[in-house]
Amino acid sequence: MYNLRYHLASLVAVFLALALGLVLGGLVVGQGALDSQQRAIVNGLQRDFQRLNEENQRLSAEVELQRGYATQMTDAWVKGRLDGKTFVVLTSGDKNEGLQATITSVEQAGGTVAVVKFEKPGMGLSDKKIAEAARSVVGTGTDLATSVAASLTAEWSTAAGSRPLTDALVSAGAISLTGLKTSTVATQAIDIAAFSSKPDKVALEIAKAYAAAGMYAVGAQTMTSGNSVAAAAAAAKLSAFDTLGTAPGQFTLVALFSGGKQGYYTLGNEDGPKYPPVPVP
């Protein structure tokens, strides 16, 4: 079974063969003629290029076929599996990479999404104004990030007439909210927050607080982000994956929140699982 790496390798081979053919072709023009051995090399490269080009077209067609099949099967499998569940998605004001893929994955499975965007790294808790706003609610004497994470988890996972810490952080410009009303009860968390290609530490603290409170949280990132959010979540003993935005990534997210085998599903481990086992009826 071929994979993406094989597909890319074939493309590289095609272009290398083409480049070498162009170089030798230039020699033909410049010198007027080549001996029979050199001509044989050129002819051989041309045949190889043609063969690789045909193979690449076949592989491209197979990739499209399997991508379409995977997408259709995933869409059918996830339907209704997250009905009645509300998720808080922790994202950042940096790139928001993977946010739309996360929202789509949850909503296609029947879940509801509330988005909390960190406007500054670490929720800006190193900023005096923001720190004072947070301390006015959580008090002093404990680690600020830990206290904020625990308090926000409690506020977001229960229905309440008011959410003082959330309101204080919004007013201070630390976070902005979409869909997180005082009546919203979000008992699931998805952390995709990163700044300058580094996982946000306070977002991870909130994900950990969700898990510590007996709820559930997952760390996720796209294959191209390179921000190590998934690895940081896995190191914190949370489930995580780095295929967000693909059909396997959508399956993984829904499976993790609907009773699938927990774990770290990464493309970085050659021998490890890339997605949870598919449940068999």
Image: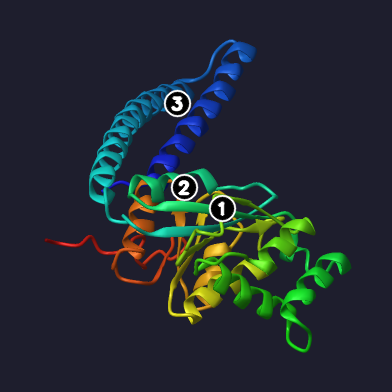
Q: Residue at the location (65% across, 58% down)?
A: 194
**Position above or below: 1 against 66:** below
Disc sitting over residue 61 in the figure: none
Q: Which residue bears the numbered disc 3?
A: 37
Q: Label 1 neighbourhood size at 10 Å, few (<14), some (14-19), many (20+)? A: many
Query: Based on the displayed image, in which of its 4 quarters is residue 203 positioned?
Result: bottom right
Secondary structure of the residue carrying numbered label 3: helix
Amino acid type, mark 1? Val
Mark 1 or 2: in front is 1
Separation of marks 1 and 2 at Cα, in angstroms: 9 Å
Secondary structure of the residue carrying numbered label 1: strand
Q: Which residue bears the numbered disc 2?
A: 103
Separation of marks 3 and 2 at Cα, in angstroms: 60 Å
Query: Based on the displayed image, in which of its 4 quarters is residue 181 positioned?
Result: bottom right
Separation of marks 3 and 1 at Cα, in angstroms: 66 Å
Mark 3 or mark 2, earlier in chain? 3
Q: Residue at the location (50% across, 69% down)?
A: 158
Confirm or deny contact between disc 3 and disc 2 (CB under 8 A).
no
Mark 3 or 2: in front is 2
Amino acid type, mark 2? Ile
Q: How many marks?
A: 3
Q: Which residue bears the numbered disc 1?
A: 115
Q: Where in the figure is residue 98, as x and y percent of width and height?
A: 53, 48
Query: Based on the displayed image, in which of its 4 quarters is residue 82 positioned?
Result: bottom left
